[in-house]
Amino acid sequence: GESLKVILESKKLEIDYKPKILEVIATLDTGEGVEVGKLFEVLALPEHTIEKTLDELMSQGFVFEPHPGKIKKI
């Protein structure tokens, strides 16, 4: 059971950035969506973290891509 405990511990440390990213999208969106590149600039997070979170948000139906490279809240 020791290895399972380690896995559970590491999962707990994974921070949920979804609320923060949704907030930033809402703040930056002037109507056409927000460029993903802009999110990389504004959020002090690794690009893969932002991309992974955006993928999760899309699959959960919180955001969509009105144009390639742009993200918009639903």
Image: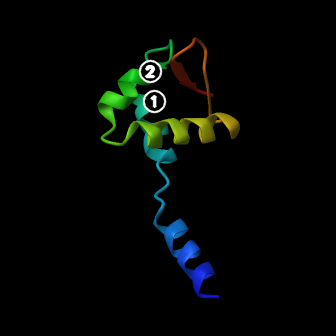
Is label 2 in a helix, a strand or a loop? loop
Q: Residues within 10 Å of mark 1 (few under 14, many from 20)?
A: many
The kind of residue on which mark 2 rests is Asp
Asked if disc 1 and disc 2 are in contact, CB closer than 8 Å, the reply is yes
The residue at which mark 1 appears reads as 25
Q: Residue at x 46, y 66 (%)?
A: 13
Can residue 62 be seen here? The reply is yes
Q: Relative to the observer, which residue lies in front, 11 or 1?
A: 1
Is label 1 in a helix, a strand or a loop? helix
State the image coordinates of residue 67 (x, y, percent, origin top left).
Answer: 58, 11
Can residue 61 be seen here? The reply is no
- Distance between the alpha carbons at the discs numbered 1 and 2: 6 Å
Q: How is the image coloured?
A: rainbow
State the image coordinates of residue 11 (x, y, percent, origin top left).
Answer: 54, 66
Q: Is residue 26 above or below residue 21?
A: above
The residue at which mark 2 appears reads as 29
Q: Residue at x 63, y 28 (%)?
A: 74
The kind of residue on which mark 1 rests is Ile
State the image coordinates of residue 2 (x, y, percent, origin top left).
Answer: 58, 87
Q: Is residue 27 above or below residue 21?
A: above
Residue 22 relative to residue 42: left or right: right
Q: Residue at x 46, y 30 (%)?
A: 26
Of the 4 image quadrants, the one containing the N terminus is bottom right
State the image coordinates of residue 41 (x, y, percent, origin top left).
Answer: 30, 28
